[in-house]
Image: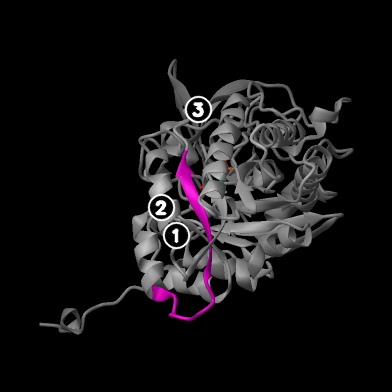
Amino acid sequence: MPNCKQYEVGKDCFSPNRNLSPLTTEIDVEGSLMLAKCKVSDLANRYGTPLYVLDETTVRAACKAYKDALEQYYPGDSLPLYASKANSSLAVSHLVASEGFGLDAVSEGELLTALQGGVPPNRIVLHGNNKSDQELLLAYKNSVLIVLDNQHDIERLAELVPSGGIPARLMLRLTPGIECHTHEYIRTGHLDSKFGFDLDQIESVLIYLKGESWARLEGLHAHIGSQIFELEPHRDLAEVMADVLLLAQKLGHSIKDLNIGGGLGIRYVKDDNPPSINTWVKVVSTAVKESCSSRNLDLPRLMCEPGRSLIATAGITLYTIGSRKDIPGIRTYISVDGGMSDNPRPITYQSLYTACLADRPLDSVEETVTIAGKHCESGDVLLKDIQLPSSKSGDVLVVFSTGAYNSSMSSNYNKIPRPAAVIVNKGQADLIQKRERSEDLLQYDVVPDRFRVVG
Ligand SMILES: *Cc1c(COP(=O)(O)O)cnc(C)c1O
């Protein structure tokens, strides 16, 4: 059961990434969970379940926390970018753009969502370790910053940019060779990573790019991983990047942007203790500032790319409880109407979550149960051995901190339609993603004519 009355005194407590539930969480007089003045079980009734619910106040507060801290601690220009793979939609694109954020995209789909979602193209950055020609061209034509991840990107762009055309705006991604403690699937900055140029390749790439008229190198990029609670790796990263910045300058490049990636962790369960957004920005800003000044470098524009820490705790998922199986002395399974298709993180990363009953969040704990999804996998378990009051079929279950890497990683496994998503603010709920229907899932199936022949 999350601590719903969590507005503890002390600045760091307000950092959205350190809360187990969205900032606007309250309990009403009847003891039901409220979000942005909307009764959560009413949302479940109105929109059906499973339902993704996003709290606008929390997303905006996280954006402001990044912006304010950059202004406070970094003396140069800065531009925070939202790593849209965390939760990509037109509405979220509009939301972060209205807070002055740019956006990271890693595919044509994410790029289109950003462009059509009102993010100014010159504030969009395209990543990817295997970009298609189509993706590169869409980015180039919109003057989007393209992150060179490997030699293939360079070769393709050299061919795709028309001769005499405007040069492509580029960043160079380095593999900084930094280890950090997170799940191995989401570590990206160590030497054995598929992303970026190794440090010993950088000099020759910089020399090559200097002589190419199609290329305009504007920045350097690195990203060391995700759900990171340590601050030291980012200090180390600033040193590595400042060294490369110095090298680039010596080779005649005028680099104006330094992009240090994302990666700040969030609190999924009580024991998680990530630094606040404020602390993280302070540490990276100070490290970049000091690394540059000790090398006599002008301060670059500082970019960072939060995904999870910007949106995860703003989101909750609502499920309806269905069947129950008691295995005496072993386990009690409670099954809900979603699972690994709307939240693949537990089965993929063994991620932990926090949950409560929507209408009895503060009731005393009566049993230890395992919340299972409805998919045909024994591993389809959303929460293992959690404490809940006794519940019955039809009750609404709330899972917290599902705003990042849930909707965006969802699938149609077992031909289960994806949930709807709503955004709530000041007592109002608005649909931002329609619920799929089972019929929708057949629209791309094709039956060869010869299969239709009866006989
Ligand atoms: C995934 C990713 C991010 C965002 O990471 P979070 O941990 O969600 O903040 C930022 N930059 C790049 C290049 C990424 O791949």
Report helix, strand or loop for mark 3.
loop
Establish if 347 lies above or below 425: above
Ligand 1: does it lie within 8 Å of the C-beta at label 3? Answer: no
Q: State the extent of the magenta-drawn residues as a range.
A: 160-175
State yes or no: residue 212 in magenta: no
At a point 49% along the width and 40% down the height, the residue shown is 345
Q: The residue under label 3 is which amino acid type?
A: Cys
State the residue position of label 1: 209
Place of residue 432 in the rendered image (x, y in percent of width and height, measured from the top left): 67, 64
Ligand 1: does it lie within 8 Å of the C-beta at label 2? Answer: no
Q: How many discs mark residues in the rendered view?
A: 3
At a point 64% along the width and 43% down the height, the residue shown is 312
Q: Do the residues labelled 2 and 3 touch (CB within 8 Å)?
A: no
Q: The residue under label 2 is which amino acid type?
A: Val
At a point 85% along the width and 29% down the height, the residue shown is 11
Place of residue 224 in the rendered image (x, y in percent of width and height, measured from the top left): 51, 37
Which residue is farthest left? 455
Place of residue 366 in the rendered image (x, y in percent of width and height, measured from the top left): 65, 21
Q: Which of marks 3 and 1 is nearer the N terminus?
A: 3
Q: Which numbered marker is on residue 300?
A: none
How far apart marks 2 and 3 lie (CA) works out to 26 Å
Report helix, strand or loop for mark 1.
helix
Occupied quadrant, residue 230: top right
Q: Do the residues labelled 2 and 1 touch (CB within 8 Å)?
A: yes
Q: Is the N terminus in the top left, top right, bottom left or bottom right quadrant?
A: top right
State the residue position of label 2: 205
Place of residue 44 in the rendered image (x, y in percent of width and height, measured from the top left): 68, 52
Q: Is residue 252 left or right of residue 360?
A: left
State the residue position of label 3: 180
Q: The residue under label 1 is which amino acid type?
A: Leu
Report helix, strand or loop for mark 2.
helix
Q: In which quarter of the image is ligand 1?
A: top right
